[in-house]
Image (tube, helix red, strand yellow):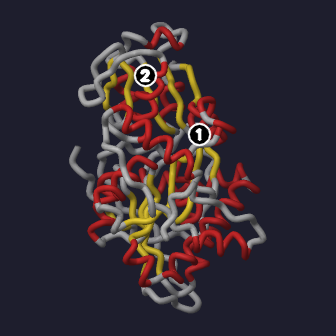
C-alpha cells in the first residue's frame, strides 16, 4: 500500500477557548490523506530547550488518545516551554515510519507492528521505543445474522486494516489457534482475510461484502452502530487483559541530540495519561474535540461511548506483549525472525516516572545497552 502524505497541523487550540464536545470525530482509515487544522497557533512560552521545534506524529484514532488529549489540552506543549510542538497527523504506519526514518518526523505514536517493522528495516539504527501509550481497544465484530459463535467465522470474510498490521497479525494468530489454515500473503483459506482501509470498512459491512472485522476503535463501535455485534474483545486473549496497541517512538538521531526535548514530551505524555485516568469523561470530550478538528466530522454518542472505555492509556510499553505479537507475525510467515534487542530505551521514561513518584517499567530484556 502506498504511504499517505502527512500534513503539519497549523496549530493548537488553547484549551480554555475550546468547548469540550460531548461528541466528535470519525476515525480516518489507513492510507487516507490527513487534513489541515485551521485552529490558531498557541505560542510556546517559557525557556526553550535544545531544539526550536519538535515534530510529533500520530493518527486521528482513539487508540492515540494520549497524543490527541495531550495536544488538545496543551499539556505536552506546557512541558516543552519555549520549544514549539509541531503536530502532524498520519493515517498509516508505513508513512509515519518513513517520516521517522527520513528525518521529517522526530517522535511518533505507532502500533507494535510498524514499530517492529521500522526497527528491523533500519537494522536497529534509526528508531527507539521510549514509552507506552495505550492498551486494548481492538474487537472482532460480526454480522449477527451470519455469525453467532466463534466457530461460525470459518468460511466467512473478515476485514483487517492492512496486511501485516497489528490487528491483521492478531486475527491470523486467533484463526490459527482455531486450527484453520490461512495463507497470510493472499488472505485466502479456511477464513478469508480482507485487507480493508478502516475508513471504508463500515461501507463494506453495509454492502455485505464482509461478514465482520477485527479492528481498532472507533471502527469497531462504528460497525456496531451499523448493526454488527461484538463477538470477541481482544483483551480477553491476553494475561491481565493488557496488550500494547500504541507506543511512543523516537528517531535515534533526535534522541541523541535532544534528550531534554524527548524527556519533556514524555513528561507531557505521563501527565496526560494521569489526567485522562483521573478525568475520563472530560478526556473523552477532549479527544473528540481534537478528532473533530482533525477530521471535520463528529462521532455520534453511540460510537464514542462504547469505544472510549475499551481503551486504556498506559505509560508502560508492555514490552513482553510486543515480543509476543512479533512471534505471531513470524509464525504467520509475514516476517522473518527479527532481532529486537535494543528496540527499547526507557531511560528517560523511568526518570520521569521516578520524579512523579511512580514505579519504573521494564523492557522485557529488549533494551538498548
**Image point 56% across, 35% down: which residue?**
303
Q: How many marks?
A: 2
* Position of residue 293 measured from the top left corner of the image (x, y, whole percent): 47, 57
Q: CA distance from mark 1 to mark 2?
A: 32 Å
Q: Which residue is mark 2?
A: 176
Residue 175 relative to residue 315: left or right: left
Label placed on residue 304:
1
SS type, badge 1? helix
Residue 336 visible to an observer of this rendering = yes
User: Which residue is nearer to you in this view: 181 or 287?
Assistant: 181
Q: Residues within 10 Å of mark 2 (few under 14, many from 20)?
A: some
* Position of residue 295 measured from the top left corner of the image (x, y, whole percent): 42, 51
Label placed on residue 3:
none
Instruction: Place residue 337 in its image quadrant.
Output: top left
Which numbered disc, 1 or 2, marks the residue closer to the eye?
Answer: 2
**Image point 49% across, 84% down: which residue?**
83
User: Which residue is nearer to you in this view: 154 or 43?
Assistant: 154
Image height of 323 relative to 193, above or below: below
SS type, badge 2? helix
Residue 38 visible to an observer of this rendering = no
**Image point 60% across, 78% down: which residue?**
79
Residue 246 relative to residue 275: left or right: left
User: Which residue is nearer to you in this view: 323 or 84?
Assistant: 323
Image height of 13 relative to 113, above or below: below
Q: Quadrant of the N terminus?
A: top left
Q: Residue furthest left?
A: 2
**Image point 63% across, 29% down: which residue?**
236
Amino acid at each position: 500500500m502506498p504511504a499517505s502524505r502527512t500534513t503539519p497541523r497549523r496549530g493548537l487550540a488553547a484549551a480554555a477557548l475550546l468547548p469540550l464536545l460531548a461528541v466528535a470525530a470519525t476515525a480516518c482509515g489507513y492510507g487516507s490523506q490527513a487534513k489541515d487544522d485551521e485552529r490558531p497557533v498557541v505560542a510556546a512560552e517559557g525557556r526553550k530547550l535544545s531544539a526550536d521545534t519538535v515534530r510529533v506524529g500520530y493518527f486521528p484514532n482513539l487508540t492515540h488518545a494520549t497524543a490527541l488529549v495531550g495536544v488538545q489540552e496543551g499539556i505536552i506543549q506546557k512541558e516543552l516551554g519555549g520549544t514549539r510542538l509541531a503536530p502532524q497527523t498520519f493515517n498509516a504506519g508505513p508513512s509515519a515510519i518513513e517520516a521517522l526514518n527520513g528525518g521529517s518526523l522526530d517522535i511518533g505514536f505507532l502500533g507494535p507492528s510498524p514499530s517492529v517493522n521500522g526497527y528491523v528495516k533500519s537494522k536497529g539504527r534509526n528508531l527507539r521505543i521510549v514509552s507506552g501509550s495505550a492498551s486494548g481497544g481492538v474487537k472482532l465484530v460480526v454480522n449477527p445474522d451470519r455469525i453467532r459463535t466463534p466457530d461460525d467465522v470459518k468460511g466467512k470474510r473478515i476485514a483487517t486494516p492492512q496486511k501485516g498490521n497489528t490487528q491483521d497479525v492478531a486475527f491470523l494468530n486467533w484463526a490459527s489457534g482455531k486450527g484453520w489454515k490461512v495463507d497470510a500473503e493472499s488472505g485466502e483459506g479456511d477464513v478469508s482475510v480482507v485487507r480493508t482501509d478502516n475508513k471504508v470498512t463500515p461501507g463494506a459491512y453495509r454492502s455485505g461484502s464482509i461478514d465482520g472485522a477485527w479492528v481498532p476503535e472507533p471502527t469497531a463501535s462504528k460497525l456496531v452502530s451499523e448493526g454488527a455485534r461484538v463477538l470477541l474483545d481482544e483483551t480477553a486473549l491476553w494475561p491481565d487483559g493488557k496488550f500494547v496497541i500504541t507506543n511512543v517512538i523516537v528517531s535515534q538521531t533526535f534522541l541523541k541530540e535532544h534528550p531534554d526535548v524527548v524527556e519533556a514530551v514524555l513528561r507531557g505524555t505521563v501527565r496526560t495519561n494521569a489526567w485522562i485516568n483521573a478525568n475520563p469523561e472530560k478526556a473523552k470530550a477532549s479527544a473528540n474535540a481534537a478528532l473533530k478538528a482533525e477530521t471535520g466530522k463528529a462521532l455520534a454518542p453511540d460510537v464514542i461511548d462504547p469505544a472510549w472505555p475499551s481503551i486504556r492509556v498506559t505509560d508502560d510499553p508492555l514490552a513482553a506483549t510486543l515480543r509476543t505479537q512479533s512471534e505471531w507475525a513470524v509464525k504467520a510467515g509475514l516476517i522473518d525472525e527479527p532481532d529486537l534487542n535494543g528496540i527499547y530505551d526507557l531511560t528517560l521514561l523511568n526518570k520521569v516516572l521516578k520524579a512523579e513518584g511512580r514505579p519504573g517499567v521494564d523492557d522485557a530484556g529488549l533494551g538498548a545497552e
